[in-house]
Amino acid sequence: MKTTILRIICLAIISFTPVFYSCEKYLAERPDQELSVPNSLEDLQMLLDFYRGMNVQLPVAPILLADNFYLTTDAWESAQELERNLYLWKKDDNTVGPWLNSYRVISVANTVLDELKDIGRTKANSESWDNVQGSALFFRATYFLTIAQLFAPAHYPETINQQFGIPLRLNSDFNERSVRSTVGETYQQIIDDFRASAGLLPVTPTVKSRPSKPAAYGSLARTYLIMQDYEKAGLYADSCLSLYNQLIDFNLLDSSVVAPFERFNPEVIFHIRSGAPSVLFPSRARIDTFLYQSYANDDLRRSLFFSANDDGTHSFQGDYDGEGDRGFVFGGITTDEIYLIKAECAARSGNVDAAMQCLNTLLEKRWRSGTFTPFTAADKHEALGRILEERRKELVFRGVRWSDIRRLANDPAFAITVERIIDNQHYILPPQIPGYLVQIPEDVIEVSGMPQNP
């Protein structure tokens, strides 16, 4: 049985890969259906539990595009071509990695959902059946949302009807031609999947690499924040924290170790991460100087998140994956992110006192004991400025900064201009609406006939 399941997993990850390509070009032959099609709830759950296939496929491109670190010319030149081009925001249609890896997971989720239709939901299996369906929907929505931050315009009133959304693959038929949805349809599908999963998933998962109800609520809060629907983002942040709200007291952590944070630590609601691109290793990626200097001396994040280099620069070590200096990028749902979403949404609604109270609840756990003075704000604008600053400082290297750059582009008070210097040449990425688009892989464009991003 175990051998059969392992073969099923391998086939699901490999054979179902070309969900957007023609089968003639990318499949030599159709896989043996007896091996490739799971036929029980246990089989389907094991597909979803395949950690390396489902939880380690997040693209690192959002990290490379944002402004939390910089590369020296030597480090940039030693990176792979796509990494170099993403870092300088150069046009590159060889983006098969982030596209392919994401749609692999989506394909597995769709396979599970299709096969689940043939397994009846009964009183005896209802808990397992609901968990399988809810988990598949959650994974599909998670990767839809991630690639939408790269290949689709930001969600603005002027973009929602544009036919530049992502292909919404909703079944496992790899012969079905991919077409681009509108931006509005892209985000509506993500919302629909997360909402449906929230009604099916348990409050407490067996392990944090499995989705849960708080994870679905937290993902909805993140999605609505990206969509700039701050009222709904705040409501779902509340729903998430009402079920799970643990915070770590950073005074209890050891900043002298390479990895101060454990995998599945108390703040992690759902664990998912990228691989380990060498360009993000501490020996190459240097933390933005102004970002590092923004942490007060008594702010424990200064020593827990960063390690000093011999040349006076700093590298990141505070990844919530628990690997510290391995270049992994954690991108899961955590309570600290949800507190920050709740604080921002309260500030945007004009409830300054509630916003600062929520922010201070988080920050009190980050400062050296006895040194923290609660922050105050005179008005909505001051509160937002403080919260957005702390959002960047708290969620450094979590993969959300790029989404923040995109959604704040139309706000003159908080719009972000990103700058690079490579080989004494200055590169600038100013606020763009509806820009910030990565090119779709050229092979996908040729086979599907989809329009390429401008």
Image (spheres, rainbow, N blue to C red):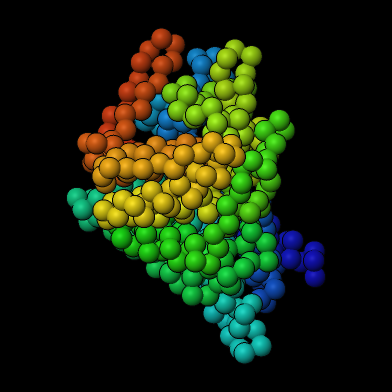
Residue 183 in the image: above or below residue 40? above
Does the image show residue 59? Answer: no
- Residue sitting farthest toward the bottom: 123
Residue 85: x, y in percent?
A: 44, 27
Compared across the picture, whether 372 is left or right of 41 comes to left
| Residue at image location 63% in from the left, 54% down from the top | 266
- Residue sitting farthest toward the top: 424
Residue 426 in the image: above or below residue 177? above
Residue 434 in the image: above or below residue 168? above
Q: Quadrant of the N terminus?
A: bottom right
Does the image show residue 5? Answer: yes
- Residue sitting farthest toward the front: 370
| Residue at image location 28% in from the left, 37% down from the top | 414
Q: Quadrant of the C terminus?
A: top left
Residue 91: x, y in percent?
A: 37, 30
Compared across the picture, whether 190 is left or right of 310 comes to left
Q: Nearer the viewer, residue 47 or 260?
A: 260
Residue 412: x, y in percent?
A: 22, 36
| Residue at image location 51% in from the left, 39% down from the top | 372
Compared across the picture, whether 102 is left or right of 34 comes to left
| Residue 322, picture quadrant | top right
- Disc tally is 0
Q: Nearer the viewer, residue 380 or 161?
A: 380
